[in-house]
Image: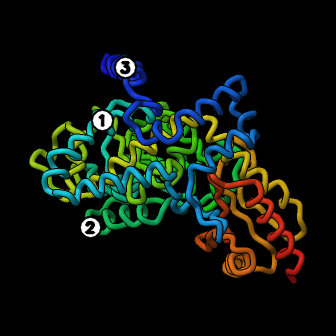
């Protein structure tokens, strides 16, 4: 009965919010800057599938022009942090200037009131209820809040993986040291193109003491998309909760958080959503909120109000309000179109180098197993050397990774990335591989 009520309630909210809010609302900076041109571009591709739109360079040229990226480097490390489009930067600057006209008044009596409309806008994008969304600074804060806040006790077991993000791994290890929980890590050799193999690895690690499974939606090192829904369904059959690290999936993949069937979810909004740097979001299934203690102070730590997780003291209200314009930007593009475009960009360069002598890809190119991130290496060249050569000789910025069983350079395009940029990457890898001994 409760699940049926929650589902109906969620659907009702989404229908209502879709009518009341949108990228082209009259008051948005996005509408003022892009409405006329983007609506024209939209009409030209309205009859096309997202996969077809992914290859329409005229459409994506409009999106590319909305960014202010430096022409002096080719930024292919969007897996770390993405630049914001100009309208998002302008929103932050506008609200920062307003704040400094009278900080106490404008922060607490004006801008603080904007968090509720923002919560509704994020909930619409996430397919969730506003009362399940907390706004914070990044996925580390969101997920650490949940990890430290769950009522785990000595001997309770948590299952994670060695390639989960270190900040989450360290949080579990801290609880193991302080409280005696048992933290187990699985080892995967990616790429893996078999959902059942991954799900079985988690299921085989379950014992009668397992209380929680931690899953990274997209593994940040090599871009492997994990079968989160299947893992969650399996976990639920054993009565186990699941926390999902969505740092690299939210704003990139086209999904609604409740459809994952997880219990807890955290993400950074300054990655693929292109929100202001230092913005994040936490989602907790409504009936689970009361059991999670906030990481910071609250007068009702066992209450059911999601806002108990937002007591950060003085914070950046301009950054929060800039998130709204990033959501406008996302919704105007369309989440599925964006996913398919970025996947197309990844495959564009990766397919051109995958058969080169000495070149190895560390990421599947099948759509169900990867999207933006792809790892690449060259025999005879260390990741650090490849990183240095790409930047020093070709001004291509990316990141080298040597961690656990991963040794590669991570390449991550975004919607503002051009095919010309990727042609330069292909030329660079080809030349470096040709010189490798």
| Residue that label 2 marks | 178
In 3D space, how far apart are the residues under numbered discs 2 and 1 (Cα atoms)?
Answer: 39 Å
Judge whether 408 appears above or below 253 on screen.
below
User: Which residue is located at x 11 percent, y 45 percent?
Assistant: 300
Judge whether 295 appears above or below 46 on screen.
below
Viewer-nearest residue: 193 or 266:
266
> Left or right: 178 with respect to 252?
left
Disc on the earlier residue, 3 or 2: 3
Viewer-nearest residue: 6 or 312:
312
User: Which residue is located at x 52 percent, y 34 percent?
Assistant: 35
| Residue that label 3 marks | 16
Disc on the earlier residue, 1 or 3: 3
Q: Position of residue 120 (x, y in %)?
A: 33, 33
In 3D space, how far apart are the residues under numbered discs 3 and 2 (Cα atoms)?
Answer: 46 Å
Asked if residue 335 can be seen in this view, the reply is no
Secondary element under disc 2, as helix, strand or loop, is helix
In which quarter of the view is residue 412 placed?
bottom right
Comparing marks 3 and 2, which lies closer to the viewer?
3
Q: Position of residue 365 (x, y in %)?
A: 75, 49
Secondary element under disc 3, as helix, strand or loop, is helix
């Amino acid at each position: 009965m409760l699940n049926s009520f929650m589902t109906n309630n969620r659907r009702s909210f989404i229908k209502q919010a879709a009518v009341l809010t949108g990228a082209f609302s009259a008051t948005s900076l996005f509408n003022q800057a892009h409405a006329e041109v983007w609506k024209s571009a939209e009409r030209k591709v309205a009859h096309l599938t997202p996969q077809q739109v992914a290859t329409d360079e005229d459409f994506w040229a409009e999106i590319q022009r909305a960014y202010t990226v430096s022409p002096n480097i080719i930024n292919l490390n969007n897996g770390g942090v993405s630049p914001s489009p100009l309208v998002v930067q302008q929103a932050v600057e506008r609200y920062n200037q307003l704040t400094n006209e009278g900080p106490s008044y404008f922060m607490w009596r004006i801008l603080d009131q904007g968090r509720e409309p923002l919560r509704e806008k994020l909930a619409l994008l996430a397919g969730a209820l506003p009362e399940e969304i907390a706004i914070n600074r990044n996925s580390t804060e969101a997920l650490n809040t949940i990890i430290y806040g769950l009522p785990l006790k000595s001997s309770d077991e948590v299952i994670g993986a060695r390639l989960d993000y270190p900040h989450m791994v360290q949080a579990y290890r801290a609880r193991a040291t302080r409280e005696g929980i048992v933290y187990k890590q699985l080892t995967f050799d990616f790429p893996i193109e078999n959902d059942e193999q991954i799900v079985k690895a988690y299921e085989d690690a379950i014992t009668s003491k397992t209380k929680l499974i931690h899953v990274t939606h997209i593994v940040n090192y090599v871009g492997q998309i994990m079968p989160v829904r299947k893992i969650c369904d399996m976990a639920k059959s054993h009565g186990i909760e699941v926390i999902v690290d969505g740092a690299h999936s939210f704003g990139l993949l086209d999904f609604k958080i409740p459809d994952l069937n997880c219990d807890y979810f955290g993400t950074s909004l300054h990655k693929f959503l292109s929100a202001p740097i230092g913005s994040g979001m936490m989602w907790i299934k409504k009936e689970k909120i009361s059991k999670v203690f906030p990481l910071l102070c609250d007068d009702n730590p066992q209450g059911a109000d999601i806002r108990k997780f937002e007591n950060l003291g003085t914070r950046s209200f301009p950054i929060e309000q800039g998130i709204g314009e990033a959501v406008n930007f996302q919704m105007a593009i369309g989440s599925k179109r964006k996913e398919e475009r970025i996947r197309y960009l990844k495959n564009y360069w990766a397919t051109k180098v995958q058969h080169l002598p000495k070149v190895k890809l560390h990421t599947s190119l099948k759509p169900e197993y990867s999207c933006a991130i792809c790892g690449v290496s060259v025999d005879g060249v260390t990741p650090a050397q490849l990183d240095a050569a790409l930047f020093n000789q070709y001004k291509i910025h990316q990141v080298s990774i040597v961690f656990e069983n991963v040794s590669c350079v991570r390449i991550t395009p975004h919607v503002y990335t051009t095919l010309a940029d990727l042609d330069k990457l292909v030329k660079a890898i080809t030349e470096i591989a040709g010189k490798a001994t």
